[in-house]
Amino acid sequence: MASLESFRAPTRPLTDQLRRVPLFAALPTDRRGCLELLREGALFEVPAGVEIVAPGDAAALLVVTEGALADDGGTRVWSAGSYLGVAEALGGLPFTDAVRTVAPTLLYRLDGALVAELMTRCPAIAASLRADFAPAARRADFTPTASI
């Protein structure tokens, strides 16, 4: 797997990019703790064909702001506005599948250890993540270690 650090996008304003994604579109400007936490993450500009996640990699919240990702089998595809890694991050589990870019992609990454804190500091984001996460958790019989 390629290190994402080599694809860091330092010139892109983080908050502006995140607000383009439905999960963060209503990001309140008055929730300073929430914005500060989101700034702990980073944006990466990754060309097509790069493996960004390998089985066993530490969990993280990965948000596609532009472009697309797919698992190695091509059965799951994440396009602009979608995200992955919530179940792994909340459960303290590593990723189980390889994921690669299928187009030039602008990707936001927040370390898995900070996702539970995100759920506490950012109620609107937590509500969206809970709504998206609950059906998947029921299907997988998954019990996260963090309270959502």
Image: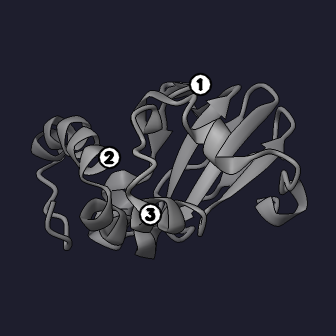
Residue 91 seen in this snapshot: yes
**Residue type for callout 1:** Ala
Which residue is disc 2 drawn over? 125
Mark found first going from the N terminus, 2 or 1? 1
Q: Residue at x 59, y 25 (%)?
A: 80
Q: Residue at x 40, y 45 (%)?
A: 28
Q: CA distance from mark 3 to mark 1?
A: 26 Å
Which residue is disc 1 drawn over? 80
In the displayed structure, does residue 30 sit left or right of residue 138?
A: right
Dot in front, 3 or 1: 3
**Residue type for callout 3:** Arg
Which residue is disc 3 drawn over? 32
Residue 128: x %, y % from top left:
26, 39
Per the image, label 3 sits on a secondary structure element best described as: helix
Per the image, label 2 sits on a secondary structure element best described as: helix
Within 10 Å of disc 1 (Cα), the crowding (few <14, some 14-19, many 20+) is some
Q: Residue at x 53, y 25 (%)?
A: 77
Within 10 Å of disc 2 (Cα), the crowding (few <14, some 14-19, many 20+) is many
